[in-house]
Amino acid sequence: MAPTAAAADELVKTYGTGDAVVKALDGVSVTVEVGALTAVMGPSGSGKSTLMHCMAGLDRPTSGRAFIGQTDVATLTDRKLTLLRRERVGFIFQQFNLVPTLTARENILLPLAIAGRKPNPQWWDTVIDVVGLADRLDHKPSELSGGQQQRVACARALVGRPEIIFADEPTGNLDSMSATEVLGFLRRSVDEFGQTIVMVTHDPVSASYADRALFLADGRIVDDICHPTHDAVLTTMSRLDPRRHPSIDSGPDDGPSPHRAKTTGGEHVPAARRVERP
């Protein structure tokens, strides 16, 4: 079994109080393997972004534990959480989050500069070559296309060689061609460099680039597919959110099987996999 890069153990996250309480996560347990691209999917309000935020140390769970490696991020002080995110975790967001007054080069290097670190020259050259930005490094975000801006964000996440990268809808603001470029880069970073990535997405095409797809509904993991294909993802999403994802099947909608019956193009694994506590 591959080493564990991150894990959630019985995570619960609630918002509000009394009759207005909302349970965004309802006892989620899952492990993320080192050197794999894991997609997290589900209908709007399913808890997928909340799960990512709790596992990445961007938000604190109401109860349960979240690990980066062997570190329980849920118990860290704010200062230690900041250091962990700076030194061990990379982030890619839908909105790019580039500093408009800085060049692409300066944006990529910003997290390292804040941490007082310098990039490894060979690794820098490799990252820039992979994302194809060599001729755009001195351009500011306003001079770049959306796809180029997201590639800057990807390079920024990767250049510090983090243990894990969390990507929240990384292709959500991109056209199909730019999205394909970014997804290809993420896939290559896993295959060639052993990077670990957790990607929240609603897009079956994006999920088909992953090694594994987790599906959330009502704050719980309800399905788990290894080596997902577009059709396998679409079939599962059509059961969870039939209004937004029409089924490719003509048969009746029976809902997700508790026994994880095999779906075309993907291998189902048990959704309720108990985490071994480090």
Image (tube, helix red, strand yellow):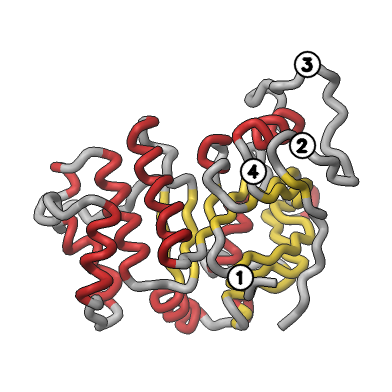
Q: Position of residue 50 (x, y in %)?
A: 61, 55
On the image, which quarter does residue 117 sit in? bottom left
Residue 222's disc is none
Vertical placement of 272 versus 231: above or below?
A: below
Residue 263's disc is 2
What residue would you read off at disc 4?
A: 228
Give the secondary structure at mark 1: strand
Q: Residue at x 71, y 25 (%)?
A: 242
Give the secondary structure at mark 2: loop
CA separation in Å, label 1 and label 2: 27 Å
Q: Which tag, 1 or 2, sits closer to the chain's start?
A: 1
CA separation in Å, label 1 and label 4: 20 Å
Vertical placement of 11 versus 20: above or below?
A: below
Q: Residue at x 57, y 38 (%)?
A: 202
On the image, which quarter does residue 266 sit in? top right
Kind of residue at disc 2: Thr
